[in-house]
Structures are given as structure tokens and as C-alpha cells.
Image (cartoon, rainbow, N blue to C red):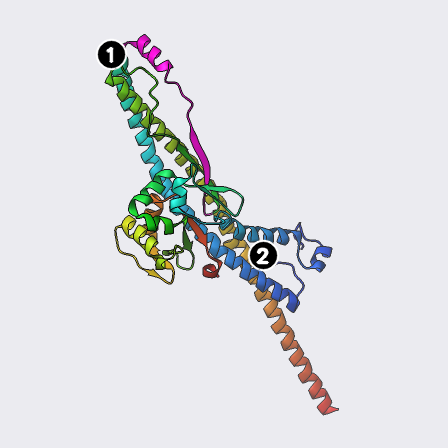
Amino acid sequence: MLKPLQDKAVMQSGQSPYEKVLHECLRGELRIVNAGLPQTQKRLSDLLTEEYPQVACNDGSTHLFKKDELKHLASMLDDDEQRALLLPMLIEVGTNQAEANVLALSGYEGKVEEKVITKTLNMPVRCEGGRIRIYRPQLALLRRKFRSTTAYVFSPRMAA
Amino acid sequence: MPELIKVRPTKIELVKLKRRLALAQRVQKIVKDRLSILTLEFLQTARETVEAKKTVLDEFSKLYKGLSIASGYHGYIALEKELIATEADLKIAAGLRNIAGVRIPSFELVNSSKPVKGYSLVDTSSWLDNAVQLSADCLKAIVQLAELQRTFELLAMEINRTKRITNALEYVVIPGLQTTINYLNMKFEERDREEKARLKRVKVLLARG
């Protein structure tokens, strides 16, 4: 027996409207998760001078940074490091449910991000291959301190 | 028992179904990751909301005491007269943040560190200064609570939606695709076996003939 949304003509064409909708929904889910990613990252030193520090996102919205967080970050770093640190810091989520990676994109072999995370978590971390690996409880702590200055990335490479 | 998807039993359909299954599994992985991140954020927000609510209540209780003392010292009429001049528009920088695809509001009081003091410092006491400082703290706490509470609601709604998608994928879509793929595989194997049997029969007939 055919389903309500299936008829013979549709069956001959290959995909029913129901399945097309389902397919679109699934593809939509993939789009949604990374829609809020910023188009570009901005330097901490530049954000500190802006009245309303923000970056544009891929979905057309803007991501507003909290000034308190920016000041807190600035207090941890010297002038050169402030110029190097790119915000928002990206946290890559994928393969292993128990861990996440902070992407070190600021140059200096990730030394700036390393310093920020080391000071925040109060434990040494190492940058390997442009990624700083942290575990879920540490991720919660990091997000608690830096809610607006970090963003999640769902990597298709990792999810595949 | 998952329902079979009605498709023509052809190899092309099998390939299509396998592709669809791969996509569904990939999406399921991402949706599960997203759900775990949303849950983590939700729990954290819940904790912070409770703390923020406590802070608001504490701040209001302090403010009430502060204002009582100030009004007792100055008298209601004098206090009201002084405070009329301090009325100012509240400036809040409002924007959005994104948590795993959920747009979360972000509020921040502009110039929150400097409470408005439009009253005469000569005619008033330090009790009033204290009450004004406490009211500024209260405002800050309210704004923070507003942001957290909205975040809490939005995350809860998104978790519900994501859970429905995960369940649909886990219990309906993927099993349906797998069952159909298995069914088609069995059908093709059956066809192969029939073909072999037919060929054997033909061979026997030819040998006899």
C-alpha cells in the first residue's frame, strides 16, 4: 500500500514529495549548525576600540561581544598578543563526544590561545597542529568565562 | 518494525538509498553533537539563571533597605524632589550571539559603571549615594537575568526540536532506509539465485537434447 504522499507518478520519478522534504530538512540541519559562524575574525585590539564590538555572521546576523569579556581578555595579554588574538575563538566539535578542539588561528603557533586557555583553566595546555585539545568539563569552564568571545564549529571533516 | 520505503527494485534505487543513508547518518552525527553542546549550554545557563535570580533578589533586598534608610533620613517629599532630576533613559546595547545555530539575545548596560547622579550632592547624604549605587547594581543584575532567562527558554525549545529530529532519524528514517536496503539486497541475491538455477536447468536440458 502506498503512503499518503506517494503516488504512482511520483514512484516512477524516483523520489516522493515526503522524501524530498525529508531530504531538504536533513540538508537544512547541516546548514543551520554552522550558520552562525562569523564571516571574519577580528583582532582583540581592534574590538577594544569599537563602541559596539561585533562581527558579521554567515547567516547575515551580527555577533555582539561583551565588553567585560574583552577587557578580561585584554588584562591577560600584552599589547602584541592583543593585536594577534583573533576573536571569536573557534571551538571545533566533532568525532569524540568527550573532547573538543580550540582552533589556534592567531599565528605565533597558537601561543596566544594557549596562554588564554592556560590562564582560564588554570592548567597547562599544548597546541598541536593548530589545535588545542580540551575535555568537556574544561569546555564548560571556558564557555562560562568566554560566552561571547568563543563560537562553536561543527566540522564536517570530523563528523564524517 | 521499520516500514519499507516503496521503491522500484533496481540497482540505481539501491545506490540512491545508500547515498541517502550516508547523508542521514552524517546528519545524525552532527545533530547528536549539536544536542550534546546544547545540553551542556542549557545546564550551564540553568545554573547561571538560578544564581542570577538569587543575585537579583539579594540586590533588591539591599536596595530596599538602602532606600528605606535614605527616605527615612531625607523624608519622602525631599527624596522624591531630588530623584526627579536623576531620571534618565536606560541605554542597553542589544545584539545576538549564536550558540550552535541558536540565536541568543545579548544585552549589556551602556555605562553601567557610572550611575547617574543628577541630584545635588550638597543637599543630600551618603545614604542616597549608597541607594543610587545599589539601584545601579540592581539594574545590571536585572539585565543579566533577562538575557539568561531568554537564553534558557530558547535553548530549551531548540533542545526539544533537536531531540525530535534525533529520534526521527534514529527510530524512523535510518531503520527504514536500512530495512529497504537489506530488502533490495535480498531481492537481488534472490534474482541471482533464480538466474543461476535457470542457467543450470538450461544446461541440463541442452545436455539431454
Viewer-side residue, A50 vs B134: A50
Q: Can you say whether B148 is above or below A91 in the image? A: above
Residue A122 on image: x %, y %: 25, 50
Q: Quadrant of residue A23?
A: bottom right
Element marked by disc 1: helix
- Specify the segment rendered in magenta: B72-100
As rendered, which of A160 and B141 lies closer to the eye?
A: B141
- Front residue (pair A67, B6): A67
Residue B1 seen in the current view? no
Check disc 2 and report the residue beneath it. Answer: B3
Question: What residue sits 68% from the left and 83% below the top?
Answer: B199
Taking the image as drawn, is residue A105 in sight?
yes
Image spot of residue B111 (x, y percent): 37, 30
> At label 1, which amino acid type do we have?
Tyr
Position above or below: B152 against A84: above
Whole-number angstrom distance, CA of label 1 to CA of label 2: 78 Å
Locate residue A68 relative to residue B172 in the image: left or right: left
Residue B79 on the magenta span: yes
**Residue placed most toward the observer, B31 or A105:** A105
Q: Residue at x 24, y 12 (%)?
A: B73
Badges 1 and 2, same chain:
yes
Determine whether, in the image, residue B107 is placed left or right of residue A112.
right
Vertical relation: A19 (above or below) A55: below
Q: Indicate the amino acid at tag 2.
A: Glu
Name the residue tied to disc 1. Answer: B73
